[in-house]
Image (tube, grey):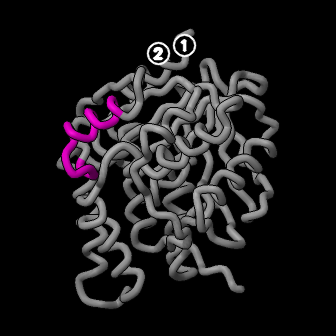
Amino acid sequence: MTTPPVFISPEGKTEIMQAYQAVMDGWPQPYQELKVPTSWGETHVIASGTEGAPPVVLLHALSATATAWYRTVEALNKTYRVYAVDVMGEGNKSTPVKPFTSLDDFLAWFTEVIDGLSIKTLYVVGNSYGGLTGAYYAMKLPERILKLAMISPAATISPMRPFYIHMFIPKLLYMLFPKFPGLKRSMRRSVDWMYAGLPADPLWDAVFHKSMLYGGLINQVFPRVYTKEEFAQIKAKMLLLVGEQEKIYNNLQIAVRSARELIPGLQVQMIPNAHHVAAVANPGQVNQALLGFFAEA
């Protein structure tokens, strides 16, 4: 079976890669680009920080690419070895040979990635879809994932109808009918909706916008809200960070309250002047929160 493309055209891939490289040219730390073979294809990982330092794995939001962490790595690298992963099945530098069709597929892939990086135990930070899958990994790998920080996880804690209305459905329509009048402009509106009136990042915005325009989505796993019983499987300490301008949930206050009810002992911090990708919007506050959380006994 032929794997569906993760770029809608060769020209689109070129534009995404050019924007991606522009962020990497501004990457604040010396880094290595690693290629980890897995059953789902070759996974691209940006590694930085002292080898042998405690590892932190960063999982980006849908279409955000690993470049979304470029304002996070410098702070974390003072103490940690950081691995920013390009999640398989999206328009980034990883090269899939088949899609994920279940959360267990994601789990098997992630396990192969951390095994390939020779990581035994780790901290995980997941934004949006990365938070959804990161929570699942923590459920199933309780002896390996010691701490989990979720940044506005996709569904996971609460329904997110606005996301489907303003981002997913326009993206799907554009992928199906890329030449239909007005749909290309809808990708810019979707990105701006997510920014919630906050300024666009001068480097990363081009990556995200072009990923929305030209990146394919081949994975077949829709986000869902986990049960209290599922969260109880997690042994890791957990932190939830949510931007005060977050717009994906049906109701932000209800989402945060639901998270506290679902996860006893959860630490929660609201990030001012931050949208869905809070590590880009307000890196200072996010980095401070992560470092404080990781430093706790």
**Is the Cβ of the residue at disc 2 closer than 8 Å to that at disc 1?**
yes
- At horizontal 17% and vertical 48% (from top left) the residue drawn is 197
Whether residue 70 is visible to the viewer of this picture, yes or no, is no
**Badge 2 density bin: few <14, some 14–19, many ≥20, Cα 10 Å:** few
Q: SS of the residue at dot 2?
A: helix
Quarter of the image with the C terminus in it:
top right
Q: Magenta stretch: dominant SS?
A: helix
**Badge 1 density bin: few <14, some 14–19, many ≥20, Cα 10 Å:** few
Inspect the image, locate mark 2, and give the three-letter code of the amino acid beneath it.
Gly
Inspect the image, locate mark 1, and give the three-letter code of the amino acid beneath it.
Ala
Residue 292 badge: 2
Quadrant of the rendered image containing residue 169: bottom left
Number of on-image labels: 2
Q: Give the image location of residue 62, x and y in percent.
A: 46, 57
Q: Give the image location of residue 31, x and y in percent.
A: 68, 38
- At horizontal 78% and vertical 41% (from top left) the residue drawn is 117
Q: Is residue 196 above or below residue 19?
A: above
Q: Give the image location of residue 252, x and y in percent.
A: 22, 41
Q: Residue furthest front?
A: 229
Q: Give the image location of residue 27, x and y in percent.
A: 55, 40
Quadrant of the rendered image containing residue 170: bottom left
- At horizontal 77% and vertical 52% (from top left) the residue drawn is 36
In this orientation, which residue lies closer to the viewer: 159 or 95? 159
Quarter of the image with the N terminus in it:
bottom right
- At horizontal 28% and vertical 28% (from top left) the residue drawn is 270
Residue 295 badge: 1
Q: Is residue 163 left or right of residue 215?
A: left
Q: SS of the residue at dot 1?
A: helix
In this orientation, which residue lies closer to the viewer: 189 or 22? 189
- Magenta range is 247-261
Q: Is residue 56 above or below residue 222?
A: above
